[in-house]
Image (cartoon, grey):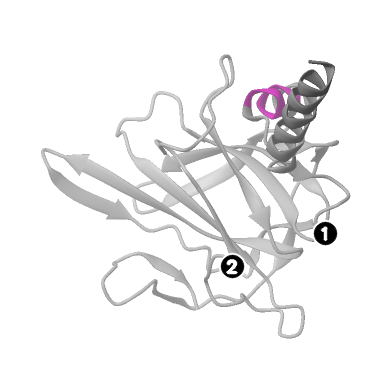
């Protein structure tokens, strides 16, 4: 009986360790981890769905690397997989990224009115744009960003950078193991020529 209980206990510990290993391990992973909040402007005249695109900057050329799963990070409003925290406006996107410097490429908005979809581009032609760095094994929190529409474009700004917000979303998400640090983006220059994202999309990104 004692042997059976020992086996059951060992299996339970193995299961817990396996589940824990699915979280991002600060200081152990070869990747970086990013958490960012996005929120639509309060009292906006038009309700829209926004997509914020951050892209890795090629250290050799100083230009954006091609868009793919390892070089780009998107945060969306009204996303089914985002994390929401009571008392904090908007929602949070998070995920692993290859280590490096990332800059804000663009914001894209879609407005649906009577089943007709309208879009608002938000490419930052720049070259000045928000930029952050994430290193291997780091987990960084980039604050909450406000999304809104101007007469012609979708735009964004860093709205709130708060330690309490960071701690709340980390507790709610339970996706990291270890300390998550505040990382306020700074401004740097990355050149941009607007191009279509692909042949079937009207969305523009930096080429």
Q: Nearest the camera: 99 or 126?
A: 99
101 over 95 or under it: above or below: below
Helix, strand or loop at label 2? It is loop
Q: Nearest the camera: 118 or 12?
A: 12
Q: Which residue is mark 2?
A: 126
Query: Of all residues shown, which one is farthest toward the bottom?
Result: 61
Q: Range of the magenta residues?
A: 167-172
Question: How far from the left and from the top, in percent, is residue 55?
Answer: 60, 65
Q: Which mark is residue 136?
A: 1
User: At x 84% / y 36%, what residue is drawn?
Assistant: 178
Q: How many neighbours does mark 1 have within 10 angstroms: few (below 14), some (14-19), or many (20 or more)?
A: some
Magenta region, mostly helix, strand or loop?
helix
Q: Nearest the camera: 162 or 158?
A: 162
User: At x 76% / y 78%, what residue is drawn?
Assistant: 59
Question: How far from the left and from the top, in percent, is residue 126?
Answer: 59, 67
Q: How many marks?
A: 2
32 over 36 or under it: above or below: below
Horizontal side, residue 77 vs residue 61: left or right: left
User: Which comes sooner in the sequence, label 1 or label 2?
Assistant: 2
Query: Of all residues shown, which one is farthest toward the front?
Result: 1
Q: CA distance from mark 1 to mark 2?
A: 28 Å
Question: Disc 1 or disc 2, which is closer to the eye?
Answer: 1
User: At x 44% / y 38%, what residue is drawn?
Assistant: 77
Quadrant holding the N terminus: top right
Helix, strand or loop at label 1? It is loop
User: At x 39% / y 23%, what residue is drawn?
Assistant: 43
Horizontal side, residue 31 vs residue 49: left or right: right
């Amino acid at each position: 009986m004692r042997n059976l209980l020992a086996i059951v206990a060992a299996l339970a510990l193995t299961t817990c360790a396996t589940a824990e290993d699915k979280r991002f391990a600060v200081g152990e992973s070869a990747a970086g981890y990013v958490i960012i909040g996005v929120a639509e402007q309060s009292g906006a005249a038009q309700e829209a769905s926004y997509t914020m695109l951050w892209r890795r900057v090629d250290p050799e050329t100083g230009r954006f690397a091609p868009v793919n799963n390892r070089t780009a990070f998107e945060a969306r409003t009204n996303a089914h997989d985002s994390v929401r925290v009571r008392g904090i406006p908007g929602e949070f996107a998070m995920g692993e990224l290859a280590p490096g410097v990332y800059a804000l490429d663009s914001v894209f908005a879609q407005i649906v009115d009577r089943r007709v979809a309208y879009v608002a581009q938000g490419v930052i032609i720049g070259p000045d744009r928000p930029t952050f760095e994430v290193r291997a094994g780091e987990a960084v929190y980039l604050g909450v960003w406000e999304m809104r529409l101007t007469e012609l474009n979708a735009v964004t700004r860093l709205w709130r950078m708060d330690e309490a917000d960071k701690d709340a979303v980390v507790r709610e998400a339970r996706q990291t193991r270890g300390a998550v640090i505040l990382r306020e983006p700074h401004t740097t220059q990355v050149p941009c020529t607007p191009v279509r994202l692909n042949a079937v999309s009207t969305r523009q990104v930096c080429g």
